[in-house]
Amino acid sequence: MNLRAAIYYPSACLMLGFVLYGCTGCGSEYSQLLSLKTSTRRVMTEYSFLQRTSERLVGKLPGGGKRSSYDSSRLTPLAQKNLITRYNYLYSTLNPMRPERVGLYFDSAQSIFWTRDSSRERIRFGAEVYGWHPAWMSDNWLLAPFRLLTTLSYYSYNVDPATGGCLNPADMEAWRSIALVDSAHAYDCRVLLSVACDGADNSARFLTNTDAWSLLSDSLSSLLRVRKADGVEVSFSDIPSDMGPRFTAFIEALSQSLEKSLPGGDFYLSIVLPPDDPDLVFNLDELQRLADMMVVQGYEYADEEGAAVAVAPLLSANENGPSLDRTVRTYMDRGLDTQMAVLALPLYGNQWRDTLDAQKGNYVSRFDRKVTYSEIRRVYNPLDTSYVLTPSLDPLSMTNYYLVEFPDRSAIECWFDDDFTLGRKMDLAMARGFRGVGLWALGYDVGHDEIWKQVRNRFATDTVQFRDPVTAFLGYPIRIGNFFLRHGDLIATTSAVFTLTVVLAMFLAFSDWRVRTSIFYEGFNFFVYILVSSLLMVPLLSWLGFFGDTRSGLLIAFLVGIGAGYLIFRLTKSMQFKRP
């Protein structure tokens, strides 16, 4: 179909639609079709102009007066592009069932078409999307969506615990020349240099060596100045339990040193918190005073022996087991300021080797290796073969997994997050009041943009409502429990007042001989009296701390209540009731 037919045919359809809609008296549709008719005329006018221009130009060429094979109905590529760009909403209106084909959407409230311009998308003000570029990922940063990042950390300066120097000088040489810093700054994305020290022995050795602190501070200051970077990320792992105060002192010394050595004393400091800190090594009150951002690591949980586990489980079958929900709740209970915190999530999965235990009838798992998201998609869901593997979703951990079984009674398991599960975990962070999320690491999902669509939908728009996936999974009972936890003091006070009111009412009622006679000489009423007495005794004695918080203590309180009620019954029964 040539351009003439492509324009005449929709014009005829528009005229027919104009008549049909006009007959039915649909005012808004009539106005829209009238606008479209006017637009069609503009198309025809431009088409005629381009046709005359092309014929005139052809006539001026050598041999232009002769008939040639040149088709004047064909527009130049530039003219075709301009024509499509200017009038593509016509196609969208003529094909209302598939507006996404041209990326246009109709807003019926404002009667306008709109489209998403990726060149203008930005993370909304106040939100945070944190990403890492590991040095070993080479030039994969070229594909990083800088428009959807607010902070980028270059990982990392590996600290020599003996001197404070650098254990990976080649990576720091790359830092001095890599264009990543300038590219990120072009999109208003701050760039940090990550400082890492791994292992309990290395951490203890460095944190007890103040001379090494000075050398590290000087080295970082020089590396930040040479690239005009924005600050430092401190990522220490496996810090010994007795090194907490030393770590806080190091952070304060580093902050003071950088403030003095950098121009204007302006720098950004973020601190990475482990997924679990049972020894309370990290003093949140002091660290939050010194830092600008706290990064809560939501992956690399301790493995359960003999069982394949998710990298970042939302919930755990064991109440005290590793989970994002437990990590977030624990840090919030310790005073974490969520408005200066992000929850880091993984763009990789764990692969496990399984061996069938014939006696128990289940698989015994052994950790194999870590696999990036792009590798998982390439290996388990290839596009160039006929076999298809469908992942299963574990709703408790909110994690996908593949299970591939072999005839020799062995198997391979791969647990990973995709765009759906990561989206739910982003919702967890935002529903709990976090400032944003982090993604470890950039380039692990190369060739796939579905995860970044989740980021865009949650952080590059102003109209977003986040629903806590834990509440959604556990349902109504957890909401009731959360209500009691939030309003515990109010409920306790109300219960105490109610209990005292009931006791006072019973005391006043017992002052009447008719009430006493009715209660103590009728079997059912006596049973109710004993039950109420015992139930009132449980919270009273527990509140006074006579029996502690154990179940046995509550049972003893209940039995004491029964005994007290029966004793009162025997005493009052022996009394002489004087009737009027």
Image (cartoon, rainbow, N blue to C red):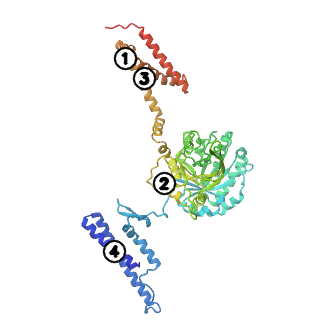
Q: Disc 3 versus disc 2: distance between alpha carbons? A: 50 Å
Q: Disc 1 versus disc 3: distance between alpha carbons? A: 14 Å
The circle drawn on residue 458 is 2
Q: Position of residue 148 (x, y in %)?
A: 53, 58
Of residue 116 and residue 362, the one placed in the foreground of this image is 362
Q: Are marks 2 and 1 in contact (CB under 8 Å)?
A: no
Q: Amino acid at mark 2?
A: Arg
Pick whichever of labels 4 and 2 is earlier in the sequence: 4
Q: Position of residue 49 (x, y in %)?
A: 38, 81
Q: Disc 2 versus disc 1: distance between alpha carbons? A: 61 Å
Q: Disc 4 versus disc 2: distance between alpha carbons? A: 41 Å
Within 10 Å of disc 1 (Cα), the crowding (few <14, some 14-19, many 20+) is few
Within 10 Å of disc 3 (Cα), the crowding (few <14, some 14-19, many 20+) is few
Helix, strand or loop at disc 3?
A: helix
Pick whichever of labels 1 and 3 is earlier in the sequence: 3
Q: Amino acid at mark 3?
A: Leu
The circle drawn on residue 11 is 4
Within 10 Å of disc 2 (Cα), the crowding (few <14, some 14-19, many 20+) is many
The circle drawn on residue 509 is 1
Pick whichever of labels 2 and 1 is earlier in the sequence: 2
User: What residue would you read off at disc 3?
Assistant: 500
Tell me which residue sits at (45%, 32%) in the image.
490
Side of 55 relative to 345 (left or right) = left
Pick whichever of labels 1 and 4 is earlier in the sequence: 4
Q: Disc 3 versus disc 4: distance between alpha carbons? A: 83 Å
Q: Disc 1 versus disc 4: distance between alpha carbons? A: 91 Å
Helix, strand or loop at disc 1?
A: helix
Identify the image quadrant of the N terminus: bottom left
Q: Is residue 195 above or below residue 488?
A: below
